[in-house]
Image: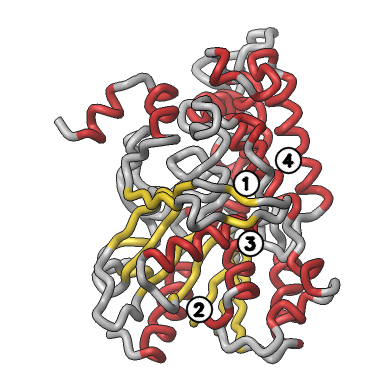
Amino acid sequence: MSDTTALRDLPAYEAARGEADHPHSAVVRFGADKPLALDAGGVLTPFQIAYQTYGTLNAARANAILLCHALSGDQHAANVHPVTGKPGWWETLVGPGKPIDTERFFVIASNVLGGCLGTTGPSSTNPATGQPYGLDLPVVTIRDMVRAQAMLIDHLGIEKLLAVVGGSMGGMQVLQWAASYPERVFAAMPIATAARHSAQNIAFHEVGRQAVMADPEWRGGRYLTEGTSPRRGLAVARMAAHITYMSDSSLHRKFGRRLQDRDGHTFSFDADFQVESYLRHQGEAFVDRFDANSYLYVTRAMDYFDLAAEYGGVLANAFRGTTTRFCLVSFTSDWLFTTADSRAIVHALNAAGAQVSFAEIESDKGHDSFLLDEPEFFAITRGFIDSAARAVGVT
């Protein structure tokens, strides 16, 4: 029996907790000689990054593509997830012969700083105490996440990435990479994202955080040391967030007002409707693989993201003089990160004189479109990555 199979035989929450320090993926540990400077002040040391790679790095080290995951993602982009046993979150896009072709490219996916699948986060053991960090971990930002990723790329011996690709929070990381390390990114593909988090999106995140913190089992963030788990609060947070990832059309198409395994209304507060049952399932499944405090940290990182603020309030200044080529993608039914958000980035890139293309894809699947079967999106991704590869001589 493999280690991964044995892991999935454990209760899901216990298996997920074990991933915090000893993930079933590659991990690089940075000691006191390589501290990570944080936007909140001070440094994080020691710390670790968990990651997966797919494909082979070529002799010129020129075919590396970094994938940046969204809020609830992790490093398991194109392999079976060790906790859930489900396919990777981007297996539609990444793999042999797929738009991001692992037979041609060396693909890297890492768990973000503040996460819970092996990169240092609030569920990781604090070496100073021997207990989980909890809220003792400093609040992290998107820029902190990218700084940590850059250290990973250094560790892998890669000077320049062929491409950095990501959607939603992953798209924020792509933009930060292009701004912070333009000389290290040949091509950047920010998908369904924005250069700053909107007030509405901050509000949605605050509802989720308050749901977690209102759960009496949260224990002021000390639930791991006290042997509890704020499962109900985190499930409600996930349910609320999941609604924002879909569209009214997709909810109507999938569920409408159809009842769940019953012929009529029960006149109770049970899950009469299929959509209610679906959301409850989403919430229950999420708490088995995700840490509640990580939810607080990662949503806060998104809230703080405002790329223009780092450059005098002018977004174009973030990309001034860049040689990175960009491709931005939005989806018509995405009301969480709208086409207007992507257009604002395109306008800034044009003002900075950057090479940029943009596509708005017709889809009724909402924000989650970039994770689903969207042939036009696949074709655009393949074309952009292939073009970048040809430009640097990657066959």
Residue drawn at x 44%, y 57% is: 373
Between the C-alphas of marks 2 and 3, the distance is: 17 Å
Dot 4: few (<14), some (14–19), or many (≥20) neighbours within 10 Å? Answer: many
Residue drawn at x 78%, y 46% is: 202
Looking at the rendered structure, the secondary structure element under dot 4 is helix
Between the C-alphas of marks 1 and 4, the distance is: 13 Å
User: Viewer-nearest of labels 1 and 4?
Assistant: 4
Type of residue at label 1?
Tyr
Q: Which mark is residue 258?
A: none
Dot 3: few (<14), some (14–19), or many (≥20) neighbours within 10 Å? Answer: many
In the current view of this chain or complex, which residue is farthest to the front?
33
339 left or right of 363 in image: right
Looking at the rendered structure, the secondary structure element under dot 1 is helix
Observer-nearest of 102 and 280: 102
Residue at which label 2 appears: 184
Observer-nearest of 372 and 316: 316
Q: Are marks 1 and 3 in contact (CB under 8 Å)?
A: no
Between the C-alphas of marks 4 and 2, the distance is: 32 Å
Residue at which label 4 appears: 205
- List x then y, in percent, for residue 358: 61, 78
Residue drawn at x 63%, y 72% is: 180
